[in-house]
Image: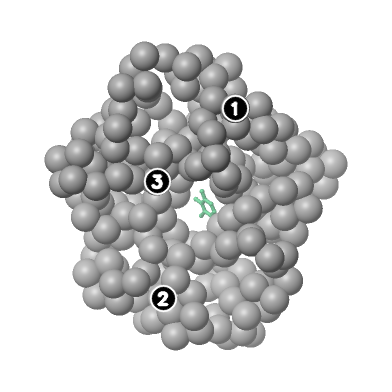
Amino acid sequence: MSVAQQIESIKNSLPQGVELVAVSKYHPVEALREAYDAGQRLFGENRPQEMTAKAAVMPDDVRWMMIGHLQTNKVRMIMPYVAMIQSVDSARLTSCIDTEAARVGRTVDILMEVHVAAEQTKSGWDEQALVDYLQSDEFAALRNIRVRGIMGMATNTDNEAVIRADFEHLAAIRRRLAPLLGEQFDTLSMGMSDDWQLAVECGSTIIRVGSTIFGEREY
Ligand SMILES: *Cc1c(COP(=O)(O)O)cnc(C)c1O
């Protein structure tokens, strides 16, 4: 199937209110244009330089989502156009995003990346550390970010029961945090090429799909 057909096929099977991020990292601008022409507006990238280069040549109504580990010294670079930073994994990064957003007079939507997978390598907050941070004075002082929800990844396994348990865990964490953050906290980003159907069943509101749409990445 073509890029356009894949996007149409995924969107047709998403329930009302669930959004699709086309993860276009490592793919050339031509592939993004094809997706854009098929109506796709949310694009996910994981490297600031690559996102900047693509944003410069893609139409202005693309909503760019940072989904990869972000270094504080790269926040300023993406601030002019990033719509949402989904991979916020530390207090230091949160503060830095707030500072850089204030500098250019805007507010930025962010998701807190939470670690639930079995692998030690996956980044993200531990649940309790995040609960503590969201109740801290340090967090309360920030004015230029809006915490919209959480992002997470399931354990890398073929065992569907394990993946489902991880997604249900993420959904439970979002529900636990919701009273701390109010109505704006409505987003649960989970589900990738191999597991997005399961993620949607577990309450995902935004899925991040790369290889199914664009094919394998060449690193
Ligand atoms: C690369 C990536 C994806 C997309 O993965 P696919 O398996 O290609 O769909 C989703 N989320 C994050 C955080 C990623 O880094």
How packed mark 3 is, by other alpha carbons closer than 10 Å (few <14, some 14-19, many 20 or more), is some
Identify residue type, mark 1.
Answer: Pro
Provide the residue designation for mark 1. Answer: 179
What mark, if any, has residue 32 been given in the picture?
2
Q: State the image quarter where residue 146 is shown.
A: top left
Q: Position of residue 182 (x, y in %)?
A: 54, 34
Q: Nearer the viewer, residue 119 or 19?
A: 19
Q: Disc 2 or disc 3, which is closer to the eye?
A: 3
Q: Is residue 89 above or below residue 107?
A: above
How packed mark 2 is, by other alpha carbons closer than 10 Å (few <14, some 14-19, many 20 or more), is many
Q: Between marks 1 and 3, how big is the CA–CA gap?
A: 18 Å
Query: Which type of secondary structure does the marked residue at label 1 adopt?
Result: helix
Identify residue type, mark 2.
Answer: Leu
Q: Position of residue 186 (x, y in %)?
A: 57, 44
Provide the residue designation for mark 3. Answer: 109
Q: Furthest residue to the right?
A: 161
Which residue is found at the position 31% from the left and 22% from the top? 141
How packed mark 1 is, by other alpha carbons closer than 10 Å (few <14, some 14-19, many 20 or more), is few
Which residue is found at the position 61% from the left and 84% from the top? 5
Would residue 2 be seen by someone viewing this image from the given angle?
yes
On whether ligand 1 comes within 8 Å of the CB at mark 2, the answer is no
Q: Between marks 2 and 3, how big is the CA–CA gap?
A: 23 Å
Mark before the other along the chain sequence, 1 or 2 = 2
